[in-house]
């Protein structure tokens, strides 16, 4: 009744924003992501019939904020009549700050819960279960370049290309380490209900997915850069136009964006993407990584810079 699992966060190049089924947490659009390498969440989980309640520690400190969502995730994987669990999470990057910490957390806990209870589920089933808790978590069950497609009743996730065959690098510029002002679920609903751009966003997503899929298949960096930046800015424009507006950026986010533009003008292979938070992720060709890193480190308002590559799928570490 005990297991541990590790998962890396992923960042979407073609974004998921909006739900078509709130109850089952099904996305309104497909998405394409890369699974990261050196950032991780490790979940140690133990079910114990003598416990009265679930408990959670994050990096050694008790945490009540994340616990309800993790408990619901355990109910989904194991059933509501399950024994209570003690969960110990270890995470080596800022949590809930737009760095996809929920993706790695829910991917890891889903695997650990299934293994601890002797359910040897295949990756497709695990991805669907993880996706019920956090849409983007379904993608962390796979490594490399990953596509999540909508099917009628669920989602289908697959690896489009492995990490080794196109080893792009990612420089993450942290502009703020605190939690984001509004969670993605709430913000997605505001966009769906009030943004005048929402229906166009959903309608056009397949075009962006096709371009990105093709760019990844042919390792066409400029093509991937163009569609990823377009898709990211479109997602944020939709949020900015909602009522109330959702603005995840700060002034340093904008400075980073200008730094990336400058690097592009000088001929470097780099593009940006931004999720539900103020951090910039600069995806770059391996040979240009150091220049991108130095330029972002020197950008006004950047408090930290992390460098990583494309990583492998989430997996179980041990189970007894
Ligand atoms: O899976 P969630 O609910 O954390 O939403 C993820 C939303 C974005 O990170 C902005 C986009 C994405 O596809 O990961």
Image: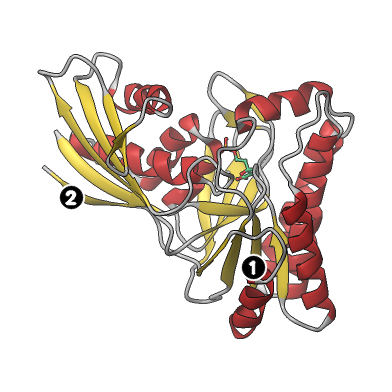
| Contact (Cβ within 8 Å) of mark 1 with mark 2 | no
Q: Within 8 Å of ligand 1, the CB of disc 1?
A: no
Residue 297: image location, x then y, percent: 63, 70
Of the image marks 1 and 2, the number of the one nearer the N terminus: 1
Q: CA–CA distance between discs 1 and 2?
A: 33 Å
The quadrant of the image that shows the N terminus is top left
Q: Which of marks 1 and 2 is in front?
A: 1
Identify which residue, 181 or 43, lies in the foreground: 181
In the picture, measured across the screen, residue 40 lies left or right of residue 154, that is left
Residue 31: image location, x then y, percent: 64, 47
**What is the total number of numbered labels drawn onto the structure image?**
2
**Which structural element holds mark 2?**
strand
Graded by Cα atoms within 10 Å as few (under 14), some (14 to 19) or many (20 or more), the crowding at tag 1 reads many
Which residue is identified by label 2? Answer: 318
* The quarter of the displayed image where residue 82 is located: top left
Residue 96: image location, x then y, percent: 52, 40
In the picture, measured across the screen, residue 89 lies left or right of residue 273, that is left
**Which structural element holds mark 1?**
strand
Which residue is identified by label 1? Answer: 283
Give me the residue at 60% from left, 79% from top: 289
Q: Residue 292 carries which label?
A: none
Q: Within 8 Å of ligand 1, the CB of disc 2?
A: no
In the picture, measured across the screen, residue 72 lies left or right of residue 320, that is right
């Amino acid at each position: 009744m005990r297991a541990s699992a590790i998962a890396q966060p992923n960042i979407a190049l073609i974004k998921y924003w909006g739900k078509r089924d709130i109850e089952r947490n099904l996305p309104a659009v497909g998405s394409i992501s890369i699974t990261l390498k050196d950032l991780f969440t490790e979940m140690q989980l133990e079910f114990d019939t003598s416990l009265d309640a679930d408990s959670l520690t994050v990096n050694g400190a008790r945490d009540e904020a994340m616990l309800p969502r993790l408990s619901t995730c355990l109910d989904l994987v194991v059933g509501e009549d399950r024994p209570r669990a003690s969960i110990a999470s270890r995470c080596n990057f800022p949590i809930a700050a737009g760095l996809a910490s929920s993706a790695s957390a829910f991917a890891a806990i889903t695997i650990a819960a299934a293994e601890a209870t002797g359910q040897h589920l295949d990756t497709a089933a695990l991805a669907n279960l993880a996706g019920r808790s956090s849409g983007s978590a379904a993608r962390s069950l796979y490594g490399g370049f990953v596509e999540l497609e909508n099917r009628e009743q669920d989602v289908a996730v697959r690896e489009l290309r492995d990490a080794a065959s196109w080893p792009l690098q990612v420089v993450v510029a942290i502009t703020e380490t605190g939690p984001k002002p509004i969670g993605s679920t709430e913000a997605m609903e505001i966009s769906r209900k009030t943004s005048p751009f929402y229906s166009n966003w959903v309608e056009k997503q397949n075009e962006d997915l096709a371009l990105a899929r093709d760019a990844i298949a042919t390792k066409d960096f400029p093509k991937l850069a163009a569609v990823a930046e377009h898709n990211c800015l479109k997602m944020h424009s939709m949020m900015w136009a909602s009522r109330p507006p959702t603005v995840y950026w700060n002034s340093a986010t904008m400075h980073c964006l200008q730094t990336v533009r400058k690097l592009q003008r000088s001929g470097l292979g780099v593009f940006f993407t931004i999720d539900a938070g103020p951090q910039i992720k600069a995806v770059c060709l391996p040979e240009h990584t150091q220049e991108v890193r130095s330029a972002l480190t020197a950008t006004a308002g950047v408090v930290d810079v992390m460098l990583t590559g494309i990583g492998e799928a989430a997996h179980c570490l041990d189970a007894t």
